[in-house]
Amino acid sequence: MKLPKVSAVVAAAVLAPAVLFPSSASAADAPRPTGASGPDTGSAGTPDAAPDGGGQEAADRAEVKRILADSAPDSYVRADAQKALDAGTPAALREFLTVGLKGSQRLDDMIAAARILSSGGPALKKAAGAALNGPYEGLVKFLKEGQYTARAEDDRAEIERLLADPATGPDTREAAQKALDTGTPAALRHFLEVELPNRREGDARLKLTQIMSKGGPAVKDAANTAMMGSYADVVKFLEEGQFTARAQDDRAEIERLLADPATGPGVREAAQKALDTGTPAALRHFVETELPVQREHDARVALSQIMAKGGPEVRAAANTAMDGSYADVVKFLQEGQYTARAKDNRAQVAQIAEAGGPAVKKAALAALDGNEQAVATFLLEGWAKARAEDEAAAKPGTEPTARPTEQPTTAPAAQTGQSAVTGGQVVQAAARTTSGTGTTGTTGTTGTATVTRTTTGTTGTAAAGSGQLAATGTEGLGLEAGGAAAALAAGAALVVVSRRRRSAEG
């Protein structure tokens, strides 16, 4: 082959190397023919001397066959050697060994450099381009040494990029740092070619496991299916499947919140808006971003309502919680309000004991000697009965108590309304207020209706004190239940006693 054709062939090799050379082997890696110059010299060389006549032809034929056997399958050296053998003439064999071999070898080296140029990293491309544009001796040196130095530079840069990428998994990161610390071209190349694929799969499966452990039912199911599959299945789950499954879980969670009567108005409104939008992004944004904010907002609203209606201890505890974190607010709604309300109740009973008649004092002191249930029961039932006894004793002939059918039929329990944060929403205990001198007032709150019973006695009775009584029961954001019925029943008993008192005096 004539050397003027080299540039065109090299250009073709760069543009379509797979067409010209179906094998991946490089001519630079192929064994050099014995008797021909290697890449160090760049000369074709001359075969050893052989006997004249038929002996020369036999020696040339043997040498060409050896070159053919040692050459890479896709090299021009092999192609030209086969062509010389096929011609079969002594002249063709001699022409190949003395002239053609050198040109074929040079062309193979140029094609090898062109392949490197088309697929290497920045440093390798730069070095390959310089070798192709320089003298042949430089090209041979590049193929023998320079390409490995340049590739190591590219490998180091790629490993540093992996270490700088926050998405790189821990297993990959550990192996990459180890290769970088070793620093040899062989260590860098071994990591990228051998270790990196295995480390990446290990990190991907670890990430899948973490997602599965925190996900909802749909995410867990999809992750488990991917884990049982190939690495490609794992990658597909991480890139696509997890988001589709998470949208299903998010929708189910939002629907659960909307179905929960304890869900506060702020959460409810934002949840419905996300559900109406319906996109995976909107659902995820609500669950991840809006829900925590709305939950805290609803909890602080509940705390404010309790603080507005509570006694001194309740107001103080609520104010402290309001100045604190969301965790402080939740703790108050779940626990603190009841502890504070119990203190207010005891203070109220102590005031009643000081100002009450004999029966009231006795019942109040007995309640104070008991537990919180006894205190609450006294306030809801015992106080009214004791006052009725004192009133009956103050005027002979007066019936001591209301008729059994008019007495409270519900026996309340202390703190029967329990505070809970369900789905971030709060159901807190109710506040009842009792105050006045010679007047007993009991207010119950149920839903949005408020009923007040008031009776006025004509004799000296216990003063409730100027402070409000935060009694037991429940009073929440749109969800109220508990001691309202008991409070109303207690008020009704006092109404009956007062009426009978007035009738006796009239």
Image (tube, helix red, strand yellow):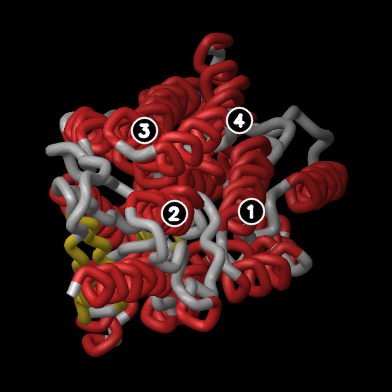
Pick whichever of labels 4 and 1 is earlier in the sequence.
4
- Residue, disc 2: 389
- Residue, disc 3: 353
Q: Residues within 10 Å of mark 4 (few under 14, many from 20)?
A: many
Locate residue 222: give its quadrant.
bottom right
Q: Is residue 168 rendered to the left or right of residue 4?
A: right
Which percent across, then down, holds residue 155?
A: 45, 29
Residue placed at 36% from the left, 33% from the top?
353
Camera-near label (2 vs 1) is 2
Locate residue 31: give its quadrant.
top right
From where the camera sits, is residue 212 visible? yes
Question: Type of residue at label 2?
Answer: Glu
Q: Nearer the viewer, residue 242 or 451?
A: 451
Q: Nearer the viewer, residue 132 or 419?
A: 419
Give the label on residue 317, or none. none
User: How far apart in space, not on screen, are marks 3 and 2 (Cα)?
Assistant: 15 Å
Pick whichever of labels 4 and 2 is earlier in the sequence.
4
Question: Type of residue at label 3?
Answer: Ala
Q: Label 2, secondary structure: give it.
A: helix
Residue placed at 34% from the left, 69% from the top?
497
- Residue, disc 1: 213
Camera-near label (3 vs 4) is 3
Q: How many marks?
A: 4
Pick whichever of labels 2 and 1 is earlier in the sequence.
1
Question: Type of residue at label 1?
Answer: Ser
Give the label on residue 191, or none. 4
Residue projecting furthest to the front: 396
Q: Residues within 10 Å of mark 1 (few under 14, many from 20)?
A: few
Residue placed at 52% from the left, 39% from the top?
372
Q: Label 3, secondary structure: give it.
A: helix
